[in-house]
Image (cartoon, grey):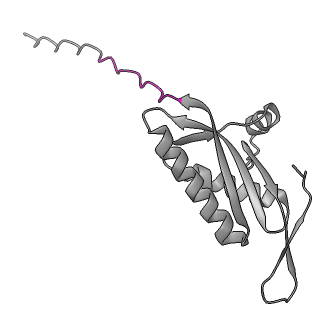
Amino acid sequence: MSENMPINVEIDNGMGSVTFADEVIAIIAGLAATEVKGVASMSGSVSSSINEMLGKKDHTKGVKVEVGKEEAAVDLYLVLAYGMSITDTCRAVQENVKKAIETMTGLRVVEVNVHVQGVKFEKETPIAIEEPAEPAAAPRVK
């Protein structure tokens, strides 16, 4: 895969060319993937995890792209939510990513490969323990 090499996409009307960095395609793919219900998070490298801990948002976490002059291929590394249909969620991710890239860039997406890296379980909510009510004060007798 080419690292941050700009790609020229010819505009149909012959007015010139538009250049996309690979990172732009990766950002589009990452955002489109996380829009799909059932995607808990993107699975990234150690460096992206460190960036996240430092408060830096990494929209390309868990995304690898290979971009040509007219085509793009995408690999996504996802963590899915427990209880969702894995095949339905992955299919929805593929469709959403393909549509987003093709609509926004004009590139033809030849493949969107989804790699499920894990399943996220919902955090258990602690059960509130009610304190016993204090006994009512006895009436004062004078």
Check residue 129 for magenta coloring.
yes
Side (left or right) of 104 relative to 131 = right
Q: Position of residue 86 (x, y in %)?
A: 49, 38
Q: Residue farthest to the front?
A: 110
Quadrant of the image containing the C terminus: top left
Q: Position of residue 113 (x, y in %)?
A: 66, 46
Q: Which residues are magenta?
A: 120-130
* Residue drawn at 74 percent across, 38 percent down: 52
Q: Position of residue 41 (x, y in %)?
A: 61, 40
* Residue drawn at 76 percent across, 59 percent down: 72
* Residue drawn at 78 percent across, 34 percent down: 45
Q: Position of residue 40 (x, y in %)?
A: 55, 39
Vertical placement of residue 130 versus 105, above or below: above
Numbered marks: total = 0
Side (left or right) of 42 relative to 46 = left
Q: Residue farthest to the left?
A: 141
The answer to which of 82 and 10 lies nearer the viewer is 10
* Residue drawn at 55 percent across, 53 percent down: 35
Side (left or right) of 34 relative to 18 = left
Assign the magenta stretch its main secondary structure.
loop
The answer to which quarter of the image holds residue 71 is: bottom right
Check residue 127 for magenta coloring.
yes
Vertical placement of residue 116 versus 111, above or below: above
The answer to which of 54 and 115 lies nearer the viewer is 115
The answer to which of 97 and 108 lies nearer the viewer is 108
